[in-house]
Image (cartoon, rainbow, N blue to C red):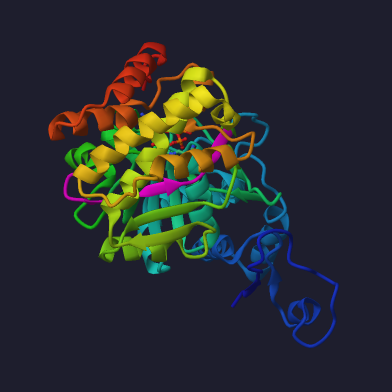
Amino acid sequence: MPVVLTSRTGSGSVLRHTYGAVGSETDLQRRGLINGVLLDPYKARVLLRLLAATGARREDVAATFDQHGRERSCCRPGSEAPCPKQTGHLRWACEVPCLRSFCDVLFKTIPEWVGSMGMKHVAVVGVGAVGGVVAAGLASTGRTKVTACVRSPLGGLRIDWPEGMTQEASVFEEFDPAQVSAVEWVVLATKAHQTAAVAPWLDRLCGAGTRVVVLQNGVEHLERVAPLAGAARVLPAVVEIGAESLRRGHVRLFDRPRITVPEDDDGAEFAALCRGSGITVALTGDFVTASWMKLCLNVANGAVTALTMRRMPVFAQPGIAELGRALVEEARQVAVASGACLSEDLPDQILARLRAMPAESGSSVLWDRLAGRALEYDARNGAVVRAGARLGIPTPYNETVTALLAAVSGPDDVT
Ligand SMILES: NC(=O)c1ccc[n+]([C@@H]2O[C@H](COP(=O)([O-])OP(=O)(O)OC[C@H]3O[C@@H](n4cnc5c(N)ncnc54)[C@H](OP(=O)(O)O)[C@@H]3O)[C@@H](O)[C@H]2O)c1
């Protein structure tokens, strides 16, 4: 029976002839183990299973690992075009003629395989800055199959962490909602105003056992997403992931990522899902306060940086600081009337926090303004105006910046 030697370290090849003691790689290979080269245990298991299904002999297994474990080239030899279905290490499987047909089997049967391996299937809808960080983190746990539901190829994910570490991850990519079916978890990380456009993905991905975690700013997660999620349960989240998309699939993180979810069964399962991903998941018994607290920050930072087209140091200007305080104070009053527990000195606290942020940090609204895209203002300042109107609390500053942001917002996405 062929046995393959692999390693769970994050990168690099399994050693061949470095150590010679009993139990070393040299010893294990002498006893017949096949070197898995660059493949981690999960990928090696898929390849070994495919080879076993072809009836490959031990020599064939060894030769395949030796040849293809080293390569990461496209599955279409001689073609520059990336494979439309497979990314990362799985591409080479299609290069072996006897395996090509098994790749089709693989992609048809992979949901059952994932289940049989005790893995969770997670679909990420909205693989930009936040979605990219979460997709890469979940893929790196080795306990999840991550499918990126995207409009154009990603070609893998690369996350630059603040400490200088670079994380690279491969995920499956799907471009057509008709090709997916219900999964255990959907991570929804589009901008709030892009939610309606991903309804076809949610329609296919959501089943009775599905949970949709909404990684979007604002306080209206349930109202926005539940009508599109069918029988799935929706888990709102407060996202503290300071991240900027540098280019497609390449994200720069400004600080360590943190997500806060309600302290219930779904929240606890999401925390378990993220264990080992590098993303801290906190559970809170007072999600109303947590989400309004974040919105109070966002009504100032997003609107001001986007309207001025300046990064965080803009809050050092006294007039801008006053505007920031006024926006936060209105949101705070609406929040308190909505049941949040927020102290009167919150505007000062938030201004101090914004001023202490690294000079290069900004907001996702600023990144979108700089790129000429549609702006996420309605789920932020617009939400404060809506709730204020419902509760009879005037919100003139937020109304004004909502109108200004609407005027400078780029065109809606064409899907
Ligand atoms: N970035 C941050 O620092 C940060 C921090 C905290 C919270 N948040 C919040 O997190 C949420 C996500 O923000 P983000 O900065 O990650 O946004 P982002 O970088 O713009 O990513 C959004 C992604 O959604 C994708 N998308 C949009 N419409 C789609 C469609 N119809 N089908 C498939 N994909 C679609 C976009 O795909 P394309 O690439 O094809 O356009 C893009 O990759 C927002 O609510 C934001 O306020 C962001």
The part of the image, by quadrant, that contains residue 388 is top left
Q: Is residue 232 above or below residue 66?
A: above
Is any atom of residue 186 visible in this view? yes
- Most extreme residue toward the bottom is 22
Q: Is residue 399 above or below residue 246?
A: above
Please say whether residue 3 is one of the residues in the magenta stretch.
no
Give 229 or 39, whichever is nearer the viewer: 229
- In the picture provided, is 387 more to the left or to the right than 299? left
Residue 308 placed where, x, y %? Answer: 51, 19
Please say whether residue 236 is one of the residues in the magenta stretch.
yes
Going 56% across and 34% down the picture, which residue do you hit? Answer: 245
Going 45% across and 41% down the picture, which residue do you hit? Answer: 348
Residue 29 placed where, x, y %? Answer: 75, 77
Going 34% across and 45% down the picture, which residue do you hit? Answer: 344
Is any atom of residue 155 visible in this view? no
Residue 102 placed where, x, y %? Answer: 48, 52
Going 56% across and 25% down the picture, which residue do you hit? Answer: 317
Q: The magenta stretch spans which residues? A: 229-245
**Quadrant for the C terminus in the image:** top left
**Quadrant for the N terminus in the image:** bottom right
